[in-house]
Image (cartoon, rainbow, N blue to C red):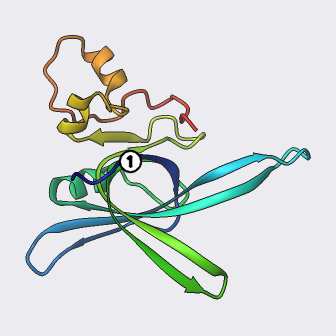
Amino acid sequence: MADATVNIPGVIASDPRFNTTNSGKRVANIRVLAGRSKPDGNGGWEQLSTTAYDVTYWAEHADLASALNPERGSKVTVTGNITGVEKYDGQNGESLSIKVNGDGLRVYPKKDQQQSGGNFNSGQQAQQGGNWGNQQQSQQTQGQQSSGWGQNPGAADEPPF
């Protein structure tokens, strides 16, 4: 049975880590917080739930993630496969950490930096129609051959969450 595939809109919780293993494999680790909220009636928002996703990118995916310069506080959308769930009991109560093997990342530009941001998406995702990162690229390249990797399509677009 295949792992569950997920699309996660959220915010990077801490500075991403980019490393190389002892065997020479490149790896990127990004912690993404996603959740639900509702208006609180006073012009603010009430947080209803938050889930932490520990996303790992390997080899070429790690290189592409690094090239997008994600940083703490960046709004992102991540795609990948769930590989595990860990439960922790801590001082602030119980928490879950969901492990994801990432194969797509979109970093949304900050309001004051309209030209930054970008995305990549694995070719498999693009073929399945789950090509959140490549829809605008397909429209822009009309007929050009694409491997599924995109840089900065629709950078001025607002995030879908």
The three-letter code of the residue at mark 1 reads: Val
Where residue 31 sits in the image (x, y, percent)? 45, 65
Q: Secondary structure at mark 1?
A: strand
Q: Is residue 75 visible?
A: no
Return the x and y of residue 55 as percentages of the image width and height.
36, 61
Quadrant containing the C terminus is top right
Residue 140, image quadrant: top left
x, y percent for residue 87: 48, 77
What residue is at 55 percent from the left and 57 percent from the top? 73
Asked if residue 110 shows in the view, the reply is: yes
Closest to the observer, 36 or 118: 36
Q: Is residue 130 above or below residue 27?
A: above
Q: Which residue is mark 1?
A: 6
Give residue 135's position: percent from left, percent from top. Answer: 35, 23
Please say if 116 is above or below 128. Answer: below
Query: From this viewpoint, which residue is outermost toward the right?
Result: 42
Extreme residue in the left direction: 23
Residue drawn at x 90%, y 44% as measured from the top left: 41
Give the farthest residue toward the top: 142
User: As displayed, is residue 48 above or below residue 134?
Assistant: below
- Residue occupying image coordinates x 50% and y 41%: 109
Q: Is residue 5 left or right of residue 63?
A: right
Total marks shown come to 1
Residue depicted at x 24% and y 31%: 128
